[in-house]
Amino acid sequence: MSTFATPPIDPMRITFETRVTAPMSPSGPVLTRRMSDLKGLFADTSEWERSLAEDRVVYEVASTPVPEIEGELPQSITTIHPGTVAGEFHMTKGHMHTRPRGEIYLGLSGVGGLLLFDGNRPEWIPMEPGVIGYIPPGWAHRSVNTGDEPYRFLAVYPGDSGHDYDWVLRNGMGYRVFSGPAGTDLRPF
Amino acid sequence: MSTFATPPIDPMRITFETRVTAPMSPSGPVLTRRMSDLKGLFADTSEWERSLAEDRVVYEVASTPVPEIEGELPQSITTIHPGTVAGEFHMTKGHMHTRPRGEIYLGLSGVGGLLLFDGNRPEWIPMEPGVIGYIPPGWAHRSVNTGDEPYRFLAVYPGDSGHDYDWVLRNGMGYRVFSGPAGTDLRPF
């Protein structure tokens, strides 16, 4: 595994496979989140605890070498594997940027959604290949796989955005996203 | 034609067609550059002047409504139509950001290249669908259509980047890009 590059950063050509889980080239850090990394996220705590025996991988984030520093514009590809915990779809931890910085997600494969919350109002953006979800500054964001195959998206964000995961644990995300009889079921909480 | 949205910006779902020239939805400003807008760019001034009778469209830039202000992360899709001026490929004006901000280009359709110049060293990144060209802060950048069909790419850039077009007129871009017998011909200048 390579790491973020050291400034000054040279121009670079970055390729990725849109249809399968493949590394970006050149590749930087890869983050793997297992069920045990997602304490406090799912509504059904008992079912989450039972899942720890297997401790499956819920999602992976593969970054390019572009560093997370002011002025740079890093990118990553997140793959959320399909599944639920007592009907609640697999999701990312979610975070608020520590600085007011916008971000985009671009759907690459599979289907899912982008859940946003500004502390008062939740928003849900259905995602599929070729769709950009725009995250304005000041909105916490989480991604959810609502389908039966891996959901993959490209993220582009300013290098000085920062990640505040505790904000989501304190404030929630406005909705929980469940698999329902009529499809995706958004439940306020 | 709609315009940039007024802050605060709501989260939004943006769709676009990757295979044909189609507007983004929702759409913001659209910029059209004709041959007459590209004075001083092409090496063969006489041939450029003759082209003004027709004054064809060389490229178009369609933006989403996300505004160009600090904190936001605007996007646009550029379509460069195929063609040359005395063998020199159709290209964008090119610019340097007025602040040190990185940018990404993502190839959507057709083939082309991303020409970068930091004032000393030029770099050439061949572009095709699924490739990201990374533009670090401090590098001027220009796009070139090196193929026979429209070359389209998505750009994502911080809203406070700014555009300095005069930098390119003063400093050049290190290379000129011609159609040669063996393909793309990069000529230092």
Image: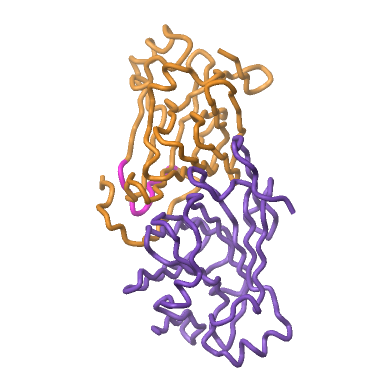
Chain colours: A purple, B orange
Q: Measured along the vertical axis of the image, is residue A38 above or below residue A156?
A: below
Q: Residue at x 34, y 20 (%)?
A: B55
Q: Tell me: B177 left or right of A118.
A: right
Q: Position of residue A47 (x, y in %)?
A: 61, 90
Front one among B36 and A60: A60
Front one among A147 and B137: B137
Q: Measured along the vertical axis of the image, is residue B73 above or below residue B55?
A: below
Q: Residue at x 49, y 58 (%)?
A: A162
Mark yes or no: residue B61 visible: yes
Instruction: Identify the image quadrant of residue B76.
Output: top left
Instruction: Identify the image quadrant of residue B94.
Output: top left
- Magenta residues span B21-29
Residue B22 is a magenta residue:
yes
Helix, strand or loop for the magenta stretch, by majority: loop
Specify the quadrant that holds the N terminus of chain A: bottom right
Residue A36 is a magenta residue:
no
